Image (spheres, coloured by chain):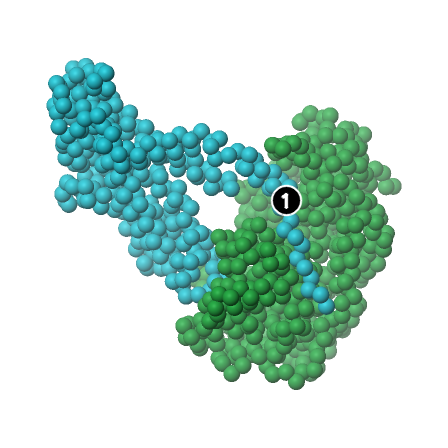
Amino acid sequence: MTIPQAPPVEGEHPLENLANEKLKTKRWFHDPLLVVGIVIVGVAIFLAAFGEAIAPYDPTVPVGPPSVPPSGQYWFGTDTSGLDVFSRVISAPRIDVTLAVSAALLSGIFGTLIGLMAGFYRGVFSSLVMRISDVLQAFPVFILAMVLVALSGRNLTNLIFALTFLYTPIFIRLTRAEVLTQRERSYVEAARAAGNSDFKIALKHVLPNSLTPSLIQLSVTVGFGILLTAGLSFVGAGVRPPNPEWGLMIANSAPQLVLGEWWTSLFPGIAVSLTVVGFAALSNAIERRVATS
Amino acid sequence: MTSTILKTTGLNVVYPTPTGQFKAVNDVDLELRSGEIVGLIGESGSGKTSLALGLLALARHPGKVSGHIDFQGRDLLSLDNDELREIRGRSIGLITQKPRQSLNPFQNVGTQIGRVYRAHVKASKSEANDHAIELLENVGINDAPRRIRAYPHELSGGMAQRALISMALSAQPELLVADEPTSGLDVTIQAQFLDRMWQRAEETGTAVLLVTQDLGIVANYCDRVLVIENGKLVEDAPTRDFFANPRDAYSKRVLALAGERAVADTADAGVSTAEPLLRIENLRKTFKLDDGKILSAVSDVSLTVMQGQSLGLVGESGSGKTTVGRLILRLLDADEGSIWFRDTELTSMKTRAFRDFRSKIQVVFQDPFDSLNPRWSVEKAISEPIDLHMKMSKDEKRLRITELLGQVGLPESIRTVKPAGLSAGQQQRVCLARALSTNPDFLVLDEPTSALPPVARVEMIALLKDLRERLGLSFIFISHDLSTVRELCQDVAVMYLSQIVEMGPTSKVFAHPEHPYTQALLDSVLFHDPLSRRVDREHRGALVGEIPSPVDLPKGCYLAGRCPFAEEKCRQEPQLLEFTEPGHLVRCWKAVGGVLNVVDTEA
């Protein structure tokens, strides 16, 4: 008896093919949201690495007369201490972006792993983790961040630690929800029937299939991280002067607004907004891609 | 008296695509007459559903319907929306797939049925309510006055489907369009449902268009068959002519495959010098529900599978057959009882020790796509058990995978493909190859064919049969499809509500079913033969209703509530599994005592 051969790989349902075709014709770069996101995030990361090097002046020492409006020499003007605003705006990502990206990555890693365990082993551990997350998320983020920084001291490492602590519950929740649906699928049972240990099933099978929501969240979290860093500095709980940092710059120059010195706060304000929008756009665009494919 | 109800000329359903127009239905001319049940068959993606919806001048977004649909002298495609709405529901009823998703989860079924009625007939709310109760009773729902207050999530699939047909029939339409109405239902429920529909067409002269993939349904219930392929109608023939002499290539292929199955002899019992390989004794498993009630999934199940033999475990969904499979695999732990595999007792083994033992007992699940890790290639999926249990060099492993792919009839080129790129049949072959990779002694096959389209299903059965002969595989085959079990298994055990109610050699059980439940199951099988239709057969002992919930089991016979032969003694005394002849066990005092007059089902 001959072995019955499976039919050749056939096309799926024509309507599904149709949908796929639509996606294929719509190339990645035809999505304006994605282009905006990539450009802004790209610039932000570039400035985080090289901003200080390409700045026309040293961002931490006075380089000219105070309160000069924007001109050919000082593109964004100078502030009350005579620091060059343009140099400071493009140097700030070294602190803002680096801090937010590290915090997002760390909370992403911790949150995903804890969420994986909480979803995989339902029971006391899972309930405990979720209740702690509830409590953390119930606090206003900003107040909690201030408290954490106040308790641990104002320096970069502590800021990263505080932000990580604050953002981890989001990743726990997202990952756990996905793990709960994935662990009910037959491939997990098949993996167990094949002789995998729980540990291997969780790491090899469930984790890779539960990452999508966290990956989408990562980019938004960077945006929020930047906003929070700037906010903390604005109220004096973040980065110390004279380090170039957007929130700090706005805080220092806000009183000058009434005197008509608009440039010292407007440019860092635009920088913060643009960067946050950029990361949010990127995450939104990725989410759309993932949802449709 | 057979007047034409609906006639289409040049019907097209077109979907715009970036690369041009996709014609899902291409220039179709068809005619539906009163009192006639017409079967529409075709492969998935051939345009069956598009055509069915097209008859109501409907198309899934962004499709467009064009051509002419003459319905009782009016061209549907020239009517405006209000006029169309008047006709849909009132004159043309629609039953879709996936009954539960087609009902509004926020309204109870009585309200939903009543609304359709009131949309077309002048009636008060209470009249509509009475009408809904009557309709539900008509489709065989017990306790209809209470049931109409149920919300869709409180209904089983079969129940929801019957609510849906009540809705479609509520305004007494002249035409009923039913799109695979019974896919996913148990055979007994399917038979109940189709019987009703057939009766209805007989009595009221309703025309029915029945979209299906199941030739058994076509052979048993349809007067005429339409075959659609790539949007074109390729065959339109009376059912008997179609089965006797199909003209179209697809029809021929499908019928040839079906014919191959019919000719194939029943699996032989063989010479039983074999040793017992798997022996289950008094297995019991209960689940504790959230409200504290106890659900008995498996109670007192004992069975034996001999070396090189196969056992079919059949029953409706909810009978506990899948739980037995999971207990054998130790995916669940039994409450009581023992499972002997050769000389090893499995239930008392430590988890860690059992992990190594798993290479000997492997499994294939029902849903092939769901049981493959979507991120893993075919090669990776198959090699996982090898990596876990065998020490093989890279070259050895590559050769072994080639061998396995050959065994399940897959091309070598498939190695790097991810599951999403495979057809359901291919996915299931990959699952089978994965299960075979460690040279297991025993397989648990948990409905491996029921999620596959008809052609793939037939191929899968042929493959399993072939593997059983060539590799001497022993397996337990869990299924609700009796004809498959008949072909594949030497022995069969019938489960009902957590118990085995009848067990014995397949040939005996199928020829002389003794338990009323087995008889009803066999009676529900639809043969691919228009000359032996279920509706023409005299069926006795049809079950009423559906499987009750396995919580609070009755103290007497579990079937008593549905059994046409039940009497007081059945309700009072628990039934025992007893021999009626050597090797044939039945759990029914009437059958054992010979009080039940046994009728042989035709072979």
Drawn side of residue B22 relative to residue A55, left or right: right
The residue shown at (64%, 61%) is B409
Percent position (x, y) of residue B79?
A: 72, 26
Q: Which residue is mark 1?
A: A13
The residue shown at (80%, 33%) is B9
Q: Which chain is cyan?
A: A
The residue shown at (79%, 68%) is B603
Against A184, residue B354 (above or below) is below
**Residue sitting at the far bottom:** B273
Q: Which chain is green?
A: B
Work out which quarter of the rendered image holds the N terminus of chain B and state it.
Answer: top right
**Residue sitting at the far right:** B1
Report the front residue among B190 and B21: B21
Which quadrant holds residue B324? bottom right
Report the front residue among A167 and B90: A167
Drawn side of residue A84 relative to residue B403, left or right: left
Q: Is residue B169 visible?
A: no
Against B16, residue B375 (above or below) is below
Percent position (x, y) of residue A280?
A: 36, 34
Drawn side of residue B28 relative to residue B106, left or right: right
* Residue type, mark 1 in image: His
Chain name for mark 1 = A
Drawn side of residue A143 relative to residue B449, left or right: left
